[in-house]
Amino acid sequence: MEIGLTHYLIISAILFSLGMFGIVARKHAIMVLMGLELVLNAANINFIAFARFGGMNIEGHVAAIFVIILAAAEAAVALAIVLNIYQNFRHVNVDEVDQMRD
Amino acid sequence: MVTEFGIILLYFILGFLFVGIALVMAALIRPSHPNPIKNSTYECGEIPIGEPWIRFNVRFYVIALVFLLFDVEVVFLLPWAIVFKQLGWFAFIEMIIFVVILLVGLAYVWGKGDLDWEKPKPYIAKLEDLVLGKKKQ
Amino acid sequence: MTHDAVLLLSIIILLTPLLSFLINVFFGGKLGKISGIIGTSILGIDFVMAIVVAFTKLVTYPDIHTIQTRFEWISLGPIKVVIGYGIDNIAAMMLIVVTLISFLVHLFSTEYMSDDRRYPKFYAYLGLFTFSMLGIVIANNFLLMYMFWELVGISSYLLIGFWYEKNSASNAGKKAFITNRIGDLGFFTGIMILYMTYGTFMFDEVFAGISSGVMPFNSPTFLTLAGIGIFLGAMGKSAQWPLHVWLPDAMEGPTPVSALIHAATMVAAGVYLVAKVFAMFTADALTFIAAIGTITAFVSATIAITQVDFKKVLAYSTVSQLGFMIMSLGVGGYTNGFFHLVTHAWFKAALFLAAGSVIHAMHHAMHHMHDHHTDPQDINNMGGLRKTMPWTYRTFLFVTLALSGVPLTSGFLSKDGLLAGTLAYANLTGGWHWIIPVMGFAAAGMTAFYMFRLTIVAFHGEPKTKIASHTHENKSVILIPLIVLSVLSLWFFYSPTPIDGSKGWVHRLVVQPASAVPAAYQWSFLLPEHAGEASPAMHAEGEGHEAAATEELHHEAQPAAHATTHAYLNKFQEESHHFHYIAMFLSVLIAGGAIGLAFMIYQYKVISADKLEARLKFLHTFSLNKWYFDELYQATVIAGTVALSKMLSWFDTYIVDGLVNLSAYITRGFSFITGLFDNHVIDGAVNLIANTTGFVGARLRKVQTGHIQTYLVFVLVGLLVLLYYFSINF
Amino acid sequence: MMDLNYITEDLIKSVGQFLPETALIITFLVAMMADILFKRSKHLTGYIAMAGLVIAGFLLYHQTGVNFKGFANMLVIDAFGQFMKYIVLLSSLIIIIFSFYSDELHAAHSRLGEYYTLIIGMTFGMMLLVGSSNLIMIYLAIETMSISSYILAGYTKEVKRASEASLKYVIFGAVSSGIMVYGISIMFGLTGSLNLFDINQYLASHQVDHLPLLISGLLIVAGFGYKISAVPFHFWTPDVYEGAPITITAYLSVASKAAGFAVMLRFFKTTFFGADQLLDGTWHLLGSINWHYVVAALAILTMTLGNLVALWQSNMKRMLAYSSIAHAGYLLMAVSVMNDGGVSAVLIYFFFYMLMNLGAFFVVQLVSNKLHTEDIEAYSGLGYRSPLIGVALTIFLISLTGLPPTAGFIGKLYVFTSVIDAGYYWLAVVGVLNSVVSLYYYVKVIRNMYLRDIESKEDKLVFSPSAIVIVFVLAVPTLIFGMYFTPIVEWANFSMNIFIGN
């Protein structure tokens, strides 16, 4: 059996779903952020796979690099914010950070 | 002929085998004379205090974050370096600008004192605090 | 200066007084006395700019009809509202009149109002008023004109009722406002007729539309009605009979206000409006205008003879003079009417400021003597002021001469031309139109008489009270405006010869606009002389005609300026020139006679005033009570309204209620049932909607749990729902 | 290599058109350095930032009439972008001025330098976003502005609410952009390009599967929807608006929304509509997905939810947050018609929305400085305690409701006109009903200010004259544009053509 585009897409879809699940279900903020990385990497797999199999141009690779960089930057800021949450709340459980609501 | 999935399977198997064999071999070959000091966590020869699963000081995170950011930016230098010769001066200047911007960022971090490792000031209790029982945190 | 610079500068001129208003209204409390200085200097700057603009227009571009700009204000598909502003020759002159008088009044008030505790507010209102008045001056369309018109109404209401603690003052403010509203109703109707017909508010476009032969509702009657409607607005503002009743009451306002508003500027707005839209009046409308003007001039002159309140005399005299101007415009004497507006502005402002000076001095004297009961405005309490207040007396006397139309004054030049116009008109139209010049000359004679009565009783002779003998001349801040204004009433500012105003620059620059009304509905003597019959063809040109017509006018206007060649714009001008000497002779004779009579009665007492009064008891009472107009209105309009409302109320209470009650009994049975329906079904439905809205809102906000992860679940669910919905349906 | 030379040339040419953005980058760097070098001066970076914004504005002015594609077709310069960039720059400038008056920011003044620098960073991101014509560029720009805004939202980090706001914002934002980038990857796979022009050509010449295109399109729209806080991507809005410093709340509600709408319009127009420009201003839709209805559905959801929930709010900032959601709904109505008239209506609305919304937030900030609360109850008697501020807030609220004679009315008028012109009467009806609902909660504040009998009536609130002047600098145009709006309408009509590269 040939390993083709479809397989990569399925992997990426699974990764995306796992990431989403992690984001929605985990209590710990760091875990939520890790779920986020999964989502972004799912997109990266898509980009690379399309570039490789779709016979498409280099844009896919470039896109992947950009996504990696931005993920890093975002993660840095998010971690800093989580630290700040710890300073104020003495925990980092996202579901307990709910002072503002209707 | 093996399919491509077969290749991946072989890849997995080989990986497990390599690690597993190495570990098993090491266990078989090495001498085993455990004592408490040997079993303790290695901390540069110091005697460890408490559990190893402690919270790391927040300052590590700050340094790590700064490192992470600068580290990832290097990704951009790589493709550029490959075609540097063909691109000529213009691309060189562009990359200089890129690096300068990063440097300004570094200077900012430095100037703000985020790279300094400040020791926390120990709290020295004053007499009146002790007497009046108004110890401040 | 280019046209753009003129336009830019004029918008600055317009906005500068607004700045004064804003400063004084917002920071007045902190500024205190400085607010007067600020207001005065701002107006001074404004005046200088107005001079620049006016001279540029009058000297550099005298032949361009209007330097104007227009821009789209509202554009909603087919409905477009274009407005703009512009400077023509009369606007340029008005700019100077308004800013100079406003400046002098500001200056005068720094002393006159200095004891008032709402001093900054006074300056704020003055600034607002000047702003709105300048807006009227530079508007080149009905809409903007109307807006500023109302703004003038409001600011004058504020100023008249400035001492609102006095009941009479606040009543006078209300009276002025309401009376003006009646006129404005007509104005608004007129504007709406024109907008519906021509789809524009711009003066020149409306005129072009009229001259292209398009009539409102296809009938010249409606054009006449539109003209009369607009003139109704002018009647309100310019206090024309029968809407004149507010102006004498408005004397309750501070005297500088009377000088600014009720002598020189606001009341002139009506005249100015009629002059601006002169081209659209049909012959019938003009006749109406002339009749109203004549009646006003005559009636108020008769009232002025017997008044004893210093300011009331001047007020009625103002009404009378405004009547003259309107009359002149009505008979076709466009230039003379406007000329009289300008000259009258100077000397009437001077008269009021002089009155202010006298009253101020009387007040001080009273204050000095601890007297709080004597009326400081009653001329019978004055007398002998000539000695105590020499400069006030000299200026007052001089402008009185101007108002009476004595040669060597500006008043003579304008009034003489104006009366000649009425003679020419009567001669050209004949019949009962001769009443107009007759009443005009009579009013002119009465003017001279009552003005000298006022002068003699107040200034000459011995002091009639101790207060009068204790008056002192005022400070120079009060005298300077007086002197400036009286100097401006000398003839040589307007004409090289003291006997003929038509030789001056005013007649050269203020050229009667060609009537836009088709020849069939216009006096033939107002149509251009040589093109009398050809004019319909000219009107057929339609768009752009106005510009062409004015250009043509200027070609004709040039020779008219040099009176040696007897080519006149139209028959009317030619005729008035013929009547010039007759009118001059008559008016000098009448004025001289009247002045002599006044001296005989009040100075030398050859004829006893009391005996005369007793003999003409009926006329005297009639005049003293102002022809009972207020009582008439009280008895008819106001009482009528009250009676009507009472009647309606009675009708309501007994007839309607009775019927209602009757039917109520019948329907009560039904209503019990329907009431149940109402309460439970209809009200229920209304409440249901309101409550549902609230309820849904209250439920929806529950979604906002505060948990970020719940939010994200909602996002994902929302995305899936959208995806599902749109993948199925589209 | 020929190819590389061509790229270099393109780069050099593009840099020449990149001047406003370059000015912002330089400002950013200078402000950062100034912040380290002159630690003492409180507002220095603020002044530098203002200067930079003004310079960027001038450079932007010089791009009038330019239609240009640069950086390998990644960025577009056109009149539409210029309009939106002006709004972004102007609101940034106004926000910086507001910040000078903010007490809550000054409690932490040692870090104010970062604050202004980050505002510049965010402005830069928005400028990029407005001109982006490449999906990766869009992602990059969104992240650039978002990352700055995450930090700014939690700028007063000692305040619990602020840190909570920034946590919620960062998670929500990161997830949304993650979803978006996943959509982008699918779009890339479907059409073989990330460039909007190329995607457009591909869609015009090929048959693309309905479902994948819908999925990728919706995922990308989710990313935009989060920026403009369209339901159901709005959940962050109330919490973040309530927690963030007021200046940043105001900024998010105007500038970042403007950038979001700009990129949304450009994305739809460039990607899904035929490149053949029709003269009557209607666009010709490519592909099988009816985007009109997708956006119309979002519009209805957005304005209805925003208005209904706003009814129940007792916190002024939160109320304005929901009101800004509702306004996004009105704007989405105009987006949904997807023709030149709609674009013009969005531009007109945005200009007025900027004035009135910033004004309202500034008043909230001033009041909160004095009373230390944002509770609507605290506004009782404000009309007597500070008449000028009361009048100004009344003007802003009436304008937000969309009643004449204010600018908000004109904005709404043009939005509804465009919707009705396109024949979506039902959408207009929903919009009008929503406006009626919104009247209630805006007027509630006005009623509180004037009609509530309270003891503190005589207790005057004194604001600094300069603050009052700034309030009126926003309030007076709100009134004037309500009466004389032709210049804005003409400007918007001039700017409504989105450059599509031919």
Image (spheres, coloured by chain):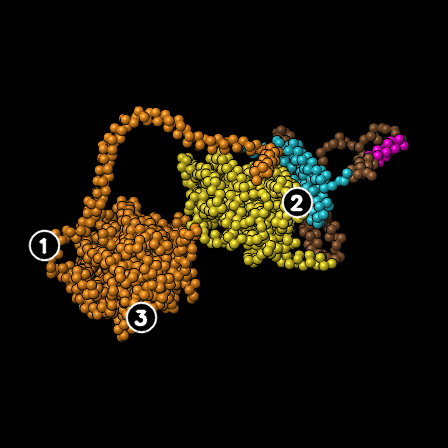
Chain colours: A cyan, B brown, C orange, D yellow
Under tag 3, what secondary structure? Answer: helix
Q: Do the residues labelled 1 and 2 touch (CB within 8 Å)?
A: no
Regarding residue D437, the answer to whether it shows in the image is: yes
Q: Does the magenta stretch include residue B26?
A: yes
Callout 3: few (<14), some (14-19), or many (20+) C-alpha neighbours within 10 Å?
A: some
**Marks 1 & 3 on one chain:** yes
Regarding residue C184, the answer to whether it shows in the image is: no
Q: Which amino acid does label 2 sit on?
A: Leu
Under tag 2, what secondary structure? Answer: helix
Task: Identify the residue under disc 3.
Answer: C556
Task: Identify the residue under disc 2.
Answer: D190
Q: Which of marks 2 and 3 is in front?
A: 2
Q: Position of residue C607 (x, y in %)?
A: 11, 59
* Residue drawn at (28%, 26%) of the image: C666
Task: Identify the residue under disc 1.
Answer: C615
Q: Position of residue C37 (x, y in %)?
A: 38, 56
Q: Distance between the residues labelled 1 and 2?
A: 112 Å
Residue C703 placement: quadrant: top right
Residue D160 placement: quadrant: top right
